[in-house]
Amino acid sequence: MDIKKEYIESVCPHSRKASPVGNIRNVFSQPVTQIALVGVILALLQILALNGLVSSSFVYALGNTLIYAIVAIGFCLLLGYSGLASLGTAGFIGLGSYAAFYIVQELGAPYIAALAVTLAVSIIIGVIVGFISLRIEGMYLAIMTLALAEIIRNLLMAIKATIKIDITNVCLFGVNVNEKAVYLLVLASFVVLMILTSNLTRSPVGRAMLTMKNSTSVAQAMGISLMKYRLLAFVISTVYAAMGGLLHMMYVRNMTTATSTLLTLSTSLNILGAVIIGGAKSLWGTAFGTFIIYGLQSMFLSKIQFFVDNPAFITMVTGVLIILVVMFFPGGFAQMVVMFSAWVKKKNVERRLREYGRQS
Amino acid sequence: MAGSRKQRRLLEKVRRLTSLRSTYEDYCKLMLDGIDRKAAEKIESGTAAIRRKLAEDNFAFAETEKIAEAVTEARVRSENERFSKLLSDAAAAGINLSDSEYAKLTAIYEKKLETIKSHAAEQAAALRREGIGSEACKKSEDDARKLCDRIRENCLHDAERKKESARSKYAKRINRLTARIESTEADIRRLDALDDSMSLGDGISLHVDGLKMYFGGVKAVDDLSFDVHEGEIFGLIGPNGAGKTTVFNCITQFYKPTAGTLLFKAAEGKTIDLTRERVHDVILHGIVRTFQNVEVVPEISVLENLMVAGHRQFTSGLAASALHLPKMKMENQVVRERARKVLDFMGLTGYADFYAFGLPYGILKKIEIARTLMCSPRLIILDEPAAGLNDTETAELAQLIRRIRDEYNCTILLVEHDMGLVMDVCDNICAIAFGKLLAYGTPAEIQSNCDVQQAYLGVDEEAE
């Protein structure tokens, strides 16, 4: 009977239809689906926190990390894809924060208006920096953007010492945004920007940026306008940083411009570090790098008594982690994942090679 | 000049629309192929059950040897697939099998095949038939055939209808685009700012006249003039530092020449003043170049490297890219298909999904040349394509250059140090030294030219 089946199969093989499992796997291999899925999971955490199953300080720290992750994925497009260095991230964050404060608090306008103004201002700044980047490159560009960030910081200090937002005034689509809903606002912004960025990197724009990073002359010979894509890279990273500032104001709600570390060089460097240790070309890696730099201490380490007693050690742990990652995995966590999966695959094939003869 | 700016904008619009139109044309073809493929699949799956039933009915008639043969064949095939998959997986995972290990595996494989053969024969012999074939079965066979035919006809008819509707859908879009292109072209004509003062003679592709490129006091190129004819392979030679690459950079606008005329005959016989083009717009007229030191983007796949060269074939903007709108997806698919075709032509299909990082030098050189073929080239500029290649590879390259010229109907300009290659493939050669023209002529003329010999070998002092 067995051989009859085999014979018929060999004469007239079953057509291989796409199985539903394969279809589902296809859908989940789409980056957009993955990002949306992570978004849903993170949103569920908020619900769990409301029921007391997860500590709300954990979710709060997570929201804060997501804000930095937004800034970092913009920077990833600038550094990892276009190969341009900038140390002005903090300044652009400050810009977004102040715009949020001014529009929402002083003018009492809705969130959408603040968003629009932030976008407009940051696009203008991005275009200016982009034009400058056509003239100077590398270290000099980094110093220049650092100077710009300092100018913005000092400007903010001169204008207003403390900026504060009364969250009950904020409304989005006519709905008041309360303290719990801000987390969802941050999460939604993160998911949308992550999807947009991921789409960009898998489009001609991403390819053009990578080409420009590797060789400007090839890019030009292939018809890629350096001006267009450098401006674009700077505009995107500036817009994302300003978005981060805007959301930070919504989330944290007050900031003392003179003492806030958010506006200093350390933020720019932290974002740079997050992108480097995450893997400059991988968006998920970058998001994870942000988690290592910002999330790890606020979410986990601060729960351990030893670190509560000695807060300086928290920064040391992060520092040692960065050194280890950069030393052994120059491509960051993204490279670590790639290498690990390659190792697993290799072990698997080696086992199959050993067992090849032993099968009946 | 204001008129000229408007004219430029309209010309750019025409270019984008034309590019979009050709994308639609290619996409339409892809769609039609897709419908055909789907129809074939549908026929296959629709008739599978019937054919299976038929095979089961006919099983009673089949001879034991035939059964054994078919089953053995199927088993050998599957074992073969498994074995080659194992080997290719091992290669992909970076496991290098030693000769003895490989021999051991092969021995096991052969032994398995032996077992399969004897086993199938035994099983077939031991097979006891249930029931005997009857005339009823024969009758059902005819019915089944008819049913299969009917299904096939239905599917084909369906596909034809779908194809017709797709064809008319894209034809409508293409017609709309054509109308827009024509109206824009009419606008351009109305402007009537076309500068007809310069035009190239028949058969001339590139006209270089009085080209000067000074870097401060250094005269890298000094008063150089030559013509490149359409469809020829033109060689530019000269000793090191003669300014060959500088000439290339001037033609492709990487350098703005200090003085001189650079005229190029673009598509439809239009004459372009290259000095007025921006460096990234030169490719739009079909002028593409390779680089002396291979410059392939290492962190994207070979296929994507070629797609980068098709960058200007995309008309979708930032929003379409960020949202992955259907238009961008369509263009991506069409450009990918074009890249595949070029890879096929270059014999690089196997490397399509490899990352360019770590590929052998010869392959990288080929990828660079493949990249120039992506954008309907009219003039391909090769900067020392044979550098670093061995003799066999150089001979292949000569073949390839001729093949490209014939297939893509373009002009080729090459700078090369390998005199064997230059003398072999070039129709005309221009020899320069210290930025000045030494000689111009056919390979034979150049070889016998005293100035060239002196420039390469130095002045023979004893003779003086």
Image (cartoon, coloured by chain):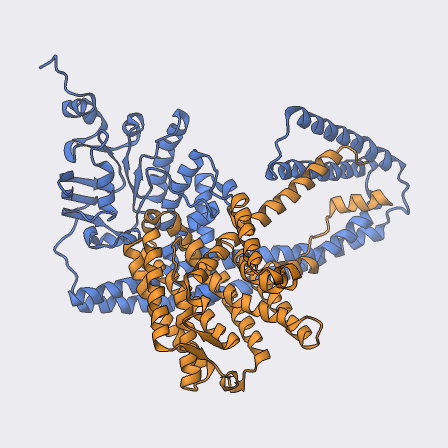
Chain colours: A orange, B blue
Residue, x 32% and y 37% (percent of image)?
B292
Rendered position, B355 above or below A64: above
In which quadrant will I find the N terminus of chain B? bottom left
Q: Nearer the viewer, residue A246 or B181?
A: A246
Q: Residue B315, percent across and down? A: 38, 62
Q: Is residue B417 visible?
A: yes
Rendered position, B85 above or below B23: above
Q: Residue A42, percent across and down? A: 62, 68
Quarter of image, res A329? top right
Give the number of marks. Answer: 0
Rendered position, B197 above or below A149: above
In which quadrant will I find the C terminus of chain B? top left
On the rendered structure, is B128 left or right of B285? Answer: right
Q: Nearer the viewer, residue B419 or B169?
A: B419
On the rendered structure, is B208 left or right of B408? Answer: left
On the rendered structure, is A35 left or right of A99? Answer: right
Q: Is residue A228 visible?
A: no
Q: Residue B325, percent across and down? A: 47, 66
On the rendered structure, is A26 left or right of A351? Answer: left
Quarter of image, res A182? bottom right
- The residue at the far front in this view is A309
Q: Nearer the viewer, residue A9 or A214?
A: A214
Q: Residue B256, percent across and down? A: 20, 49
- The residue at the far top in this view is B462
